[in-house]
Image (spheres, rainbow, N blue to C red):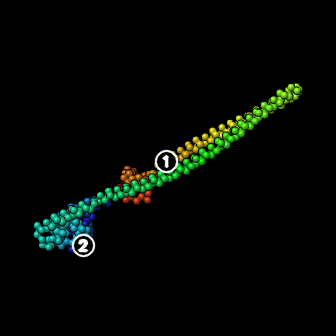
Amino acid sequence: MLRIRLQRRGRKKRPIHHIVVADNRKPRDGRIIEDLGRFDNVTPKNQLDLDRERALHWLKQGAQPTDTVRSIFKNEGIMYEMHLIRWGKSEEEIEEALTEWREKREEKEKEVPTRKERQQALLEAEEKEFQKQLKKKAEEAAKEKAKQEALASEEDDEEEEEAKAEAEEEAEVAEEDQQAAEVKEETADEEVEEQVADEEETEEVEAKEEDDSEEKAEAQEEESDEDQSVEEEADSKEEDTEEEEVEASDDEEEAEDTEEADEESEAKVSTDMLAKEAIEHIENTPLDELEGFVPEDEDRVTVQRALDDKKENS
């Protein structure tokens, strides 16, 4: 029995199928009776080069097409024309019916999107979803940042309150020291008056009182020196506190710079890029440098397809 079937030709990963008439007992790539045309199903438009008259001739002779060839003939209207011929229609009626059939098919093809249009729609949908995820991540990051800033402001307020309390305590200590110094000065004045009164009595008492007054003056000078050293220590503590605050602010700035650098280094995966940017990066980057660029949670078909094409071409 004669069969109209496809015969594979071409090269590896780029086949071209011949539509041939052959005996069904022959192997697929064996001897053929006639070559009717070519069918290229690799290209998006499924290009077809077919001798329509010879195909009808062999159908009239009883040749049976395979399922794939029957689908091709049906799409081209050959099976419909053969059906009209078997019904005994005239050539004019057959041509009129085929013209009407072709018009309906063109209208139907306009309604059905092409492969390129479907690919573009899929890409746009993935881009929209990716933008939505990026927006969600940005909102979460903004909330986290605002929370951290609120905590930092609370800590700053607590530090300011503590500093104010320490300053008040130091002021109170200084007032007490000043009051003590004033009391000591008043006591010294009274002692001087007593010494003057005693000098009128005897020279020996005056000498002793002078010695006592000198000793007391030295003691007062030592106490005043101690008060001055206490004030200097308080000033140095304030300066150390200011230096520690400056160093803390510098450490925080360095930590923020380090976090920004880490974020930039972590952004080298396809999920942090737009689909177009990820595809361009895959096309312009050697295959050995793309390891780990497309993670397992990458669910965009276009990015995975670009990586598969890169691997096949290399």
Which labelled disc corresponds to residue 313? none
Residue 142 placement (x, y as % from top left): 47, 51
Would residue 205 appear left or right of 69 to someone viewing this image? right
Which residue does the numbered mark 2 point to in the structure image? 25
Q: Is residue 273 visible?
A: yes
| Amino acid carrying mark 1 in the image | Glu
Q: What is the quadrant of residue 222 in the picture?
A: top right
Whether residue 119 is situated above or below residue 54 in the rendered picture: above
Residue 297 placement (x, y as % from top left): 43, 59
Would residue 89 appear left or right of 128 to someone viewing this image? left
Residue 176 placement (x, y as % from top left): 71, 39
Q: Residue at 18% of width from left, 73% of height from top?
A: 62
Discs 1/2, front: 1
Whether residue 80 is situated above or below residue 215 in the rendered picture: below
Point out the tag, 1 or 2, that comes first from the N-terminus: 2
Q: Residue at 81% of width from left, 31% of height from top?
A: 191
Look at the numbered disc 2 and give the secondary structure of its residue: loop
Look at the numbered disc 1 and give the secondary structure of its residue: helix
- Viewer-side residue, 231 vs 70: 231
Q: What is the quadrant of residue 270 in the picture?
A: bottom left
| Amino acid carrying mark 2 in the image | Arg
Q: Residue at 34% of width from left, 56% of height from top?
A: 124
Would residue 167 appear left or right of 26 to someone viewing this image? right
Which residue does the numbered mark 1 point to in the structure image? 260
- Viewer-side residue, 146 vs 2: 146
Answer few, some or many: residues within 10 Å of disc 1's Cα (few below 14, many 20 plus, some between 14 and 19).
few
Q: Is residue 288 visible?
A: no
- Viewer-side residue, 40 vs 72: 72
